[in-house]
């Protein structure tokens, strides 16, 4: 699974702490094209803008959103179009969420919970989708499984061994550092609470203390530094606890060569003929299994209901396919998940996951070809390693080129992530990029969306950028159902906003380039422009370019 975790900020201060002892409808509109004159936004985003920035308009708001609000206000208005089924091939999803219940795909030919395959599609009780993970959740990374099971060729296993020898000790060390920092901050926090005589305090309260002991002086210094990483000490402690959890999961599951997360499922995950397995309940197993819920909300959370957030698309049914664990997904689950989505009526499949080793990649390639043959669009996250995917060493599976120079299908669009900071820092620091292997960029940093148990939260990653694009694709297919998956992909790429502004990639000041050089289209997705172009293509007023660059 593509995940982001900002461990650098806290790890960079650990040494300093211990030296002290311790993120088709009719259109009559004109597309926006020239954005190089748009001024940089100086003011901080308001709370409302932070929760909604991906829908805002670059020209009007000076925030690099997708002009979703503008598309609804000026083009869509009260129109609904054709219902589009979007499969969320991801972790389990909260099927009872207040903002998602009304947009769930339902297999009306299946009788719930009767233990039978009523519709004869090969899957029992698949009312809202399917669960290919059964009762499993925590998993190893693929290259660790390869070492445990001795699969892949000798050169791949040698590469995997070097990687594990590097990453496992780092995970253990990072976990220990976070635990130590947490204890230092927690101890200092308790001492200051006692000194001030209250549970909640501000930075101003903290700086009002006149230390009478060396211990108090050290505590004030530590907490003063912590206020640079959060608005309150409880917020900082929560972030540190998240870090401890993240690195603990790496050490205990993802990078633990002796762990077998697949055991509860009971199949051979490297035998694609070993079916059936799993079950018909694609609901999340635990509250922390939140990824699929967050992704689904970005695409299709019920609009204008006065609750939570608004999804990009207004007439969508979400098919939940549980196939992405807390670790690397299996090629078998992804291949069969794509085929399940295609065979059961999805016209778009969102794939917010990825990995750098794929021993059965051909199974997934065949499934992508199958989706292409059935006119189904696949939207894929570019990955969160801050890497140039044009470098052959920076692999990201699945892809649409089989690690070669030419795409083998034209129904898959790969998405990088933008931040809300228009200008040199608008490319999210974690986002992968590449002038051939990444197609477009879309909002992906600090995106507010649905979480299990009727909650809402900010999360960031190309995992959040992909469903934003899946939502735009759903709008196009809803109002222009005559357009093919290939046409929708190319409309999204060709209608985006292009700029030659200088940007920093990977959060590295030394890696400055221009925005038009870091993706195949050189553009950021724009829903307003996409609907205008889709209408013109559908009505025969325009034709698509042969390529987007």
Image (spheres, rainbow, N blue to C red):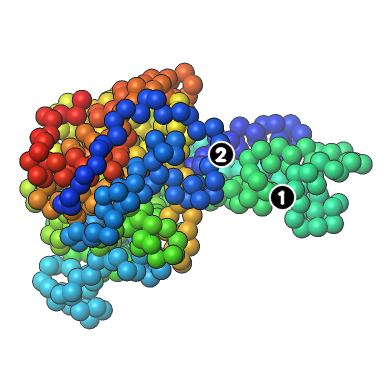
Dividing the picture into quarters, in which one does residue 280 lie? bottom left
> Which residue is identified by label 1?
186
Q: Position of residue 116 (x, y in %)?
A: 18, 77
Sooner in the amino-acid sequence: mark 2 or mark 1: 2
Q: Residue furthest right?
A: 212
> Which residue is identified by label 2?
44
Q: Position of residue 144 (x, y in %)?
A: 36, 43
Q: Secondary structure at mark 1?
A: helix
Q: Is residue 218 above or below residue 27?
A: above
Q: Position of residue 438 (x, y in %)?
A: 28, 33
In the shown orientation, is residue 110 left or right of residue 204? left
Q: Residue at x 75, y 48 (%)?
A: 202
Residue count near mark 1 (Cα–Cα under 10 Å), binned few <14, some 14–19, many ≥20: some
Q: Nearer the viewer, mark 2 or mark 1?
A: 2
Q: Residue at x 36, y 49 (%)?
A: 69
Q: Residue at x 19, y 40 (%)?
A: 533
């Amino acid at each position: 699974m593509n995940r982001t975790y900002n461990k650098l900020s806290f790890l960079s201060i650990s040494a300093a702490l211990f030296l002290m002892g311790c993120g088709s409808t009719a259109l009559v509109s004109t597309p926006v094209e020239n954005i190089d004159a748009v001024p940089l936004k100086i003011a901080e985003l308001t709370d409302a803008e932070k929760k909604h920035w991906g829908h805002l308009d670059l020209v009007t708001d000076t925030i690099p959103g997708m002009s979703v609000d503008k598309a609804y206000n000026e083009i869509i208005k009260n129109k609904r179009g054709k219902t589009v089924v979007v499969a969320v091939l991801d972790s389990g999803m909260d099927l009872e969420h207040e903002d998602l219940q009304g947009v769930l795909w339902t297999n009306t030919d299946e009788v719930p919970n009767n233990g039978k395959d009523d519709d004869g599609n090969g899957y029992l009780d698949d009312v809202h989708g399917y669960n290919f993970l059964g009762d499993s959740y925590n998993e190893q990374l693929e290259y660790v499984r390869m070492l445990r099971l001795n699969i892949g060729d000798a050169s791949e296993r040698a590469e995997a061994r070097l990687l594990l020898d590097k990453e496992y000790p780092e995970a253990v060390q990072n976990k220990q550092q976070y635990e130590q920092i947490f204890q230092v901050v927690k101890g200092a926090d308790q001492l200051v609470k006692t000194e001030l005589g209250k549970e909640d305090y501000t930075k101003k309260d903290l700086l009002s203390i006149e230390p009478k002991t060396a211990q108090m002086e050290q505590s004030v210094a530590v907490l003063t530094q912590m206020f640079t990483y959060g608005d309150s000490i409880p917020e900082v402690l929560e972030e540190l606890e998240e870090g401890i959890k993240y690195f603990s999961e790496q050490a205990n599951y993802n990078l633990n060569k002796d762990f077998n997360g697949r055991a509860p499922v009971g199949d051979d995950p490297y035998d694609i003929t070993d079916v059936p397995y799993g079950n018909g309940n694609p609901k999340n197993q635990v509250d922390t299994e939140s990824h699929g819920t967050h992704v689904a909300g970005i695409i299709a959370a019920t609009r204008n209901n006065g609750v939570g957030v608004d999804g990009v698309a207004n007439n969508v049914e979400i098919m939940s396919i549980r196939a992405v664990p807390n670790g690397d997904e299996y090629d078998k689950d992804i291949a069969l998940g794509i085929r399940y989505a295609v065979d059961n009526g999805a016209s778009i499949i969102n794939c917010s996951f990825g990995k750098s080793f794929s021993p059965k990649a051909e199974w997934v390639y065949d499934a992508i070809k199958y989706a292409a043959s059935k006119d189904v669009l696949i939207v894929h996250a570019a990955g969160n390693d801050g890497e140039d995917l044009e470098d052959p060493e920076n692999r990201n599976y699945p892809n649409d080129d089989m690690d070669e120079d030419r795409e083998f299908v034209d129904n898959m669009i790969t998405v990088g992530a933008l931040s809300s900071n228009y200008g040199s820092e608008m490319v999210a620091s974690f986002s992968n990029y590449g002038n051939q292997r990444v197609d477009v960029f879309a909002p992906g940093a600090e995106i507010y969306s649905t979480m299990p148990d009727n909650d809402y939260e900010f999360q960031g990653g190309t995992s959040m950028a992909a469903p934003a694009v899946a939502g735009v694709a759903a709008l196009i297919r809803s109002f222009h159902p005559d357009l093919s998956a290939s046409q929708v992909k190319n409309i999204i790429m060709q209608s985006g906003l292009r700029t030659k502004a200088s940007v920093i990639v990977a959060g590295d000041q030394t890696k400055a380039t221009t925005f038009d050089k870091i993706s195949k289209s050189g553009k950021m997705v724009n829903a307003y422009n996409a609907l205008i172009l889709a209408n013109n293509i559908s009505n025969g007023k325009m034709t698509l370019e042969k390529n987007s660059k």
